[in-house]
Image (cartoon, grey):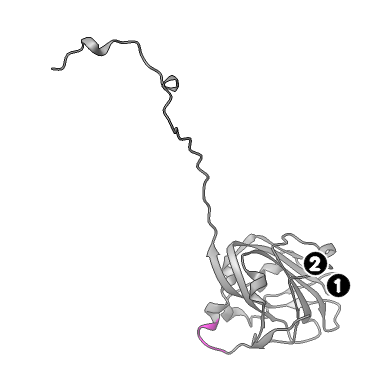
Amino acid sequence: MSCCSHEAHEDPERGQEFNLYIKIDFQTLECLNEEVEGDGIKVFKPWDKRKDFSAYVESDADEELMFNFKFVGSVKLKGLIVIGEGGEKDPSHLKVFKNSYPMTFDDGGKKADQEFDLHHDRDGVMEYQTKVARFNNCESLTLYFDKNFGAETTKICYIGLRGDFTEAQHRGVVICSYESRPQLKDHKQDNKDYSNYGVS
């Protein structure tokens, strides 16, 4: 189990680094076990809104939350930030799966591409760095928060994603047929005799 984290310093460029959320295909985003349907999308928001604790998602039946979503292209994921409200409802553990969309809680027991032990973080100063080589060519992500700090439910206010984005390449396939040697029988001919036509 790994916890690759360091403090994220406040600077003007920080918001640009954590703008990968705009590359999520939100039509594919689903949050399993959310108390209010549709709240899961609220935690993917601009950097300057990360401390808006009025927009959050809370789990329903127990402490587990699972996010499934695709990107609109290919991503190299480099880091994550997770903000909670600062209490027992904060998530304490995260499993990240690459290109396994969609997953359910029944799939949560399989080996993750990376796991993190999370800390209380109301300000978004703790970044969890990924093992970048494992997250090249990432077209979808599953974020599985399976534990918290002791509460019956889990509450998340912000998820920040940092990395590089590459536009999807849509290339059509063109099939061409070439003649190595023209065959006379393959070409229609008329029976006119052009030998008597003069040149004026």
Q: What residue type is disc 1 on? A: Asp
Residue shown at 52% from the left, 50% from the top: 171
Magenta stretch, residue numbers: 10-14
| Quadrant of residue 8 within the rendered picture | bottom right
Does residue 102 appear to the left or right of 109 in the view shown?
left
As helix, strand or loop, the secondary structure at mark 2 comes to loop
Tag shown at residue 33: 2
Residue shown at 80% from the left, 69% from the top: 111
- Contact (CB < 8 A) between labels 2 and 1? yes
Does residue 50 appear to the left or right of 179 in the view shown?
right
Point out residue 199 in the picture as x, y percentages from the top left corner: 16, 17
As helix, strand or loop, the secondary structure at mark 1 comes to loop
Q: Which is nearer the eye, 199 or 14? A: 199
Q: Earlier in the sequence, mark 2 or mark 1?
A: 2
Tag shown at residue 62: 1
Q: Which is nearer the eye, 147 or 85? A: 147
